[in-house]
Image: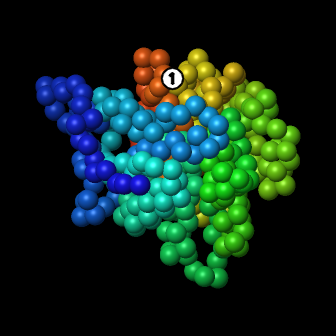
Amino acid sequence: MKHLPADMSVWQGRVDPEDGERGLRLHQTVTSYTPSCEQGGVVIYGFACDEGVARNKGRQGAALAPNTIRQALANLAWHNAPALYDGGNIVCDDTDLILAQQGLSQHIHQTLSQHNVLVLGGGHETAWASFQGLSSYVSRHTSPTHAPTIGIINFDAHFDLRTPQGISEAGSSGTPFAQIAQLCQQKGWPFHYACLGVSRTSNTQALFDKAAQLGCWVEEDIDMQVAALPALKAKLSEFIQGCDYLYLTLDMDVFPASAAPGVSAPAAIGVPVQVIEPLIQSIFSEADRQRVRVPVCDITEVNPHYDRDQQTSRLAARMAWTMLHAASHHIHQQGE
């Protein structure tokens, strides 16, 4: 495992000097992160790792995604004024997944006292690192007599609730939420998990049973259509009630293969972008309304090896832009 400082050369794009500050794009606003940076921004970390994907018998290549997503993000127009920082990449350059996850979780924990975090994975083993970093921060900022509720919202075709065993004893891209459930049990915290976009053909009955036993909120892909948005937003509002924090994670295989071909496990049906993006926006607006912080988001499972014309990286960048745009308003609201 190693931490590579931000490579600012990936942040390149068009410049429109005639438009002044109203013509800015992301590559003109992002700076390299240091602990002395002005607080109240968003720090972007990359998790260049697909060891968990390999253990889960998926298509490898997600380790290349953080910088391809950055490149796609760089030229997008920027309409807000929060501080955006690049914290570099945590790289799993061997098979020691635990060490790499610990490295990312430590960076997240250290950063959250001053900033929010967006992680660009990597396989969905990223989620275990993201949650560990968030839970460490929450533990330090919560009374010992209070069991905090971290609402986990996962847009994903898969539950990722597999029990680590055998060669995957240390976890894989298919185990993060089982690991999180176990951690919550150890801490005496509620396990409050929503998995939205589940494919019934890609998850065994055993996994559906486990989700039911854990009390998860489950929405199948076929039920997540544009016509269902009002009902889904109402359910989100109810899910967020009582939460102290939210953790948002987006596995790109939740989208149809036609929209996201470059993933470890392409979806036959998937959930339309026109459903996912409004729900992401709704998560932040509802969190603002209920005064719940959304400190950590991540985007996972982009696989540039199998992408077409950077289609999946561009979609991931659009989703990252949506999160950053919503987070900028969210940070302002939380600071009031």
Image position of 335 (left or right of 290): left
In the picture, the quarter occupied by the C terminus is bottom left
Q: Residue at x 58, y 40 (%)?
A: 54
Q: Which amino acid does the dot numbered 1 rest on?
A: Tyr
**Colour scheme:** rainbow
Q: Residue at x 76, y 51 (%)?
A: 216
Q: Quadrant of residue 198?
A: top right
Instruction: Name the residue at the left extreme.
Output: 18
143 to 97, vertically: above or below = below
Viewer-side residue, 19 vs 302: 302
In the image, residue 195 lies at what x, y percent?
A: 70, 44
Q: Residue at x 68, y 35 (%)?
A: 157
Judge the density around disc 1: few (<14), some (14-19), many (≥20) Cα neighbours within 10 Å.
Answer: some
118 to 134, vertically: above or below = above
In the image, residue 94 lies at what x, y percent?
A: 46, 49
In the picture, the quarter occupied by the N terminus is bottom left
Image position of 214 (left or right of 274): right
In the image, residue 168 lies at what x, y percent?
A: 65, 51
Viewer-side residue, 191 vs 174: 174
Q: Residue at x 62, y 48 (%)?
A: 172
Image position of 85 (left or right of 227): left
Q: How many labels sit on residues?
A: 1
Q: Quadrant of residue 160?
A: top right
Instruction: Using the rendered image of the protein, determine whether residue 103 is visible from the camera's viewpoint.
Output: yes
Instruction: Name the residue at the bottom extreme.
Output: 145
56 to 257, vertically: above or below = below
Pointer 1 residue: 306
Viewer-side residue, 283 vs 55: 55
Instruction: Using the rendered image of the protein, determine whether residue 321 is visible from the camera's viewpoint.
Output: no
In the image, residue 260 lies at what x, y percent?
A: 55, 24
Which secondary structure, mark 1?
helix
